[in-house]
Image: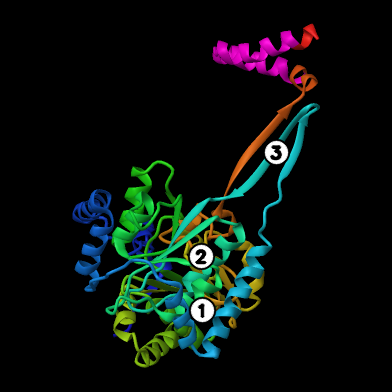
């Protein structure tokens, strides 16, 4: 069954808004109650709750939560040299790109004798959530673990749901080892987020948690960030999405492959083609059907395609407007002179320029981070970077002369706001300076 084409110029404002809506995220009252119940169980019963919930949801009765150094060594030994080289290549590229993001303290003398500094320090402890629903995700380990290591976070904890044998994928453990992560636990779902936020006998709490997950994980992150003082999350999360901008010079086979590579993530993924060419839409529809039949995850991809959009515009300028309004997680530009369009593109988590730049490169090994804002949050939230693993704070130092230089301004503004104690904190010091 082919996806119908949408002619943008025949739609009114309300119809256009409807066609750019995301699939609804499960955020119902039942889900919220279920997740809160899981959180309460972990808070009240700690490790035992995690064992019980893991047996209930993952179908495995664990005897321990922590992954041993021996298990990590054995996992690495089982992998081929080719697989390990791929992990190391991706890691090195991610490190190279994120190393360039290192922050240097900024010091400014705003007024003679008044020196202000912006400093940065790593977040002390971070938790990395690695999903393992239908496939292991060593790429996510690298995308989270490499910047955590670069930032200098003192404690990095990785959690991941176990398989039916109570194990984690060899690639996940190898990637963790490559990033210097040795504190690893076989726990997933909302219970893992609860353990990271509140702590148990086995798992000490962390300050911030990173990583994607299903609706239970997403809801747990949301609730716990509001329940636990000093605990926060990386960013709001929604289903994966990609938008391809294409003109008549694009390659329909490449477009279809890019759309399907996102569609295979999950049935709620959203894939969109926006083009000024009817011929490209027709050819892409044919390619989608042909390539879909070849996929091992074709049932998942087919469900995602049922919510896809193939949008025809009257110009590339209008196509760009559609993309900017949607604000995709991934934006692929397959047009003539694609690089010339970058300055016109806004509201995208990550942009892939030119027909030889597949989203897959950013997902794995080009060096950019694949943890990106979804669900329209690209309009206000940045893609994950080294800065997310640190906190910024300011320092100021004022000399006696500096305080005298600033005093008239301070006294006038504290008087305007009627804050006598604020003003007195200035004038008492001025009196002492004047006596000297």
Task: Tell me residue 314's x, y (percent).
Answer: 50, 71
Q: Main secondary structure of the magenta part?
A: helix
Tell me the element at label 2.
helix
Closer to the camera in the image, 313 or 142 = 142
Q: Identify the magenta region.
A: 405-432
**Of helix, strand and loop, which one carries label 3?**
strand
Q: Earlier in the sequence, mark 2 or mark 1?
A: 2
**Of 409 and 166, the residue lying toward us:** 166
Label located before the other in sequence (1 or 3): 3
Q: How is the image coloured?
A: rainbow
Q: Which residue is mark 1?
A: 360
Camera-near label (1 vs 3) is 3
Residue 144, which numbered label?
2
Question: Badge 2, how many Cα within 10 Å: few under 14, some, many 20+?
Answer: many
Circle 3 residue: 117
Point 49% across, 71% down: residue? 176
Say which of marks 2 and 1 sits in front.
2
For image coordinates 30% across by 59% down, the residue present is 190
Spatial CA distance of label 3 from label 2 is 28 Å
Vertical arrangement, residue 187 with respect to residue 261, above or below: above
Image quadrant holding the N terminus, namely: bottom left
């Amino acid at each position: 069954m082919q996806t119908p084409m949408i002619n943008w110029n025949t739609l009114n404002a309300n119809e256009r808004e409807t066609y750019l809506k995301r699939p609804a995220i499960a955020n119902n009252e039942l889900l919220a109650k279920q997740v809160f119940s899981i959180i309460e169980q972990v808070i009240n019963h700690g490790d035992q709750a995690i064992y019980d919930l893991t047996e209930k949801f993952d179908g495995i009765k664990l005897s321990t939560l922590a992954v041993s150094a021996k298990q990590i060594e054995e996992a690495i030994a089982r992998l081929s040299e080719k697989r390990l080289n791929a992990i190391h290549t991706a890691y090195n590229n991610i490190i190279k790109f994120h190393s360039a993001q290192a922050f240097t303290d900024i010091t400014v003398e705003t007024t003679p004798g008044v020196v202000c500094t912006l400093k940065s320090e790593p977040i002390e402890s971070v938790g990395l959530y690695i999903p393992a629903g239908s496939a292991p995700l060593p790429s996510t380990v690298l995308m989270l673990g490499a910047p955590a290591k670069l930032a200098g976070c003192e404690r990095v904890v990785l959690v991941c749901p176990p398989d039916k044998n109570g194990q984690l994928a060899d690639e996940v453990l190898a990637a963790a080892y490559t990033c210097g992560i040795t504190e690893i636990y076989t726990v997933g779902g909302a219970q893992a987020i609860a353990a990271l936020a509140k702590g148990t006998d086995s798992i000490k709490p962390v300050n911030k948690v990173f990583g994607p997950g299903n609706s239970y994980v997403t809801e747990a992150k949301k609730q716990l960030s509001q329940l636990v003082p000093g605990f926060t999350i990386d960013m709001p999360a929604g289903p994966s999405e990609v938008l391809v901008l294409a003109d008549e010079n694009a390659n329909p086979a490449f477009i279809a492959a890019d759309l399907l590579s996102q569609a295979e993530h999950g049935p709620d993924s959203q894939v969109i083609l926006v083009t000024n060419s009817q011929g490209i839409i027709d050819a892409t529809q044919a390619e989608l059907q042909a390539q879909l039949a070849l996929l091992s995850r074709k049932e998942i991809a087919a469900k995602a395609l049922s919510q896809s959009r193939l949008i025809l515009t009257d110009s590339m300028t209008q196509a760009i407007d559609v993309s900017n309004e949607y604000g995709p997680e991934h934006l692929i530009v397959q047009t003539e002179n694609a690089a010339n369009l970058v300055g016109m593109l806004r509201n995208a988590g990550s942009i892939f320029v030119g027909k030889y730049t597949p989203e897959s490169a950013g997902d794995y090994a080009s060096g950019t981070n694949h943890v990106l804002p979804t669900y329209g949050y690209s309009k206000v939230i940045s893609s994950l970077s080294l800065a997310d693993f640190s906190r910024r704070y300011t320092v100021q130092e004022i000399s006696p002369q500096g305080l005298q230089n600033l005093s008239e301004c301070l006294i006038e503004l504290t008087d305007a706001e009627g804050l006598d104690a604020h003003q007195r904190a200035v004038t008492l010091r001025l009196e002492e300076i004047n006596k000297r």
